[in-house]
Image (spheres, rainbow, N blue to C red):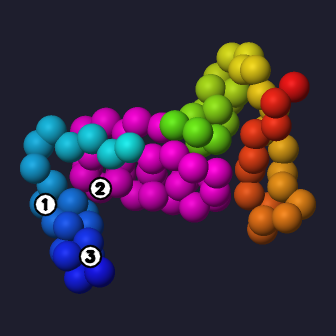
């Protein structure tokens, strides 16, 4: 665990350039503050999104996707994709 914490600390303090973050998963509410933080502090040159966070940003630009985004009733109001 200490090795992982050291790696994350290095990324957050003085990342090597170019620095690209890749984020995905289903808990969008956890990803938004991370994205805002690393971009506002200049820690990332690019942020790549996958999974539900990517779909949310795509839908925000009014681009249609093959799935819908709904609030999950089972996991702390996190966003999940449901195939239509």
In the image: residue 19, left or right of residue 73: left
Which element is circle 3 on? helix
Disc 3: which residue: 5
Q: Residue at x 26, y 76 (%)?
A: 5
- Gap between marks 2 and 3 measured at Cα: 19 Å
Question: In the image, which disc is placed on residue 41?
Answer: 2
Q: How many marks?
A: 3
User: Which of the two discs, 3 and 1, sits closer to the camera?
Assistant: 3
Q: Magenta segment range?
A: 23-49
On screen, residue 41 above or below 80: below
Q: Quadrant of residue 78?
A: bottom right
Disc 1: which residue: 14
Q: Is residue 13 visible?
A: no
Density class for disc 1 (Cα within 10 Å; few <14, some 14-19, many ≥20) is few
Counting from the top left corner in percent of width and height, residue 6 is at 19, 74
- Does residue 47 show up magenta in the picture? yes
- Gap between marks 3 and 1 measured at Cα: 14 Å
In the image: residue 84, left or right of residue 13: right
For the N terminus, the image quarter is bottom left
Q: Residue at x 66, y 36 (%)?
A: 56
């Amino acid at each position: 665990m200490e090795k992982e914490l050291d790696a994350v600390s290095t990324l957050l303090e003085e990342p090597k350039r170019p620095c690209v973050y890749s984020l995905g998963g289903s808990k969008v509410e956890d990803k938004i503050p991370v994205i805002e933080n690393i971009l506002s502090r200049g820690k990332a040159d690019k942020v790549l999104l996958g999974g539900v966070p990517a779909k949310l940003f795509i839908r925000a630009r009014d681009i249609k996707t093959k799935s819908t985004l709904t609030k999950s009733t089972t996991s702390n109001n996190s966003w999940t994709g449901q195939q239509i």
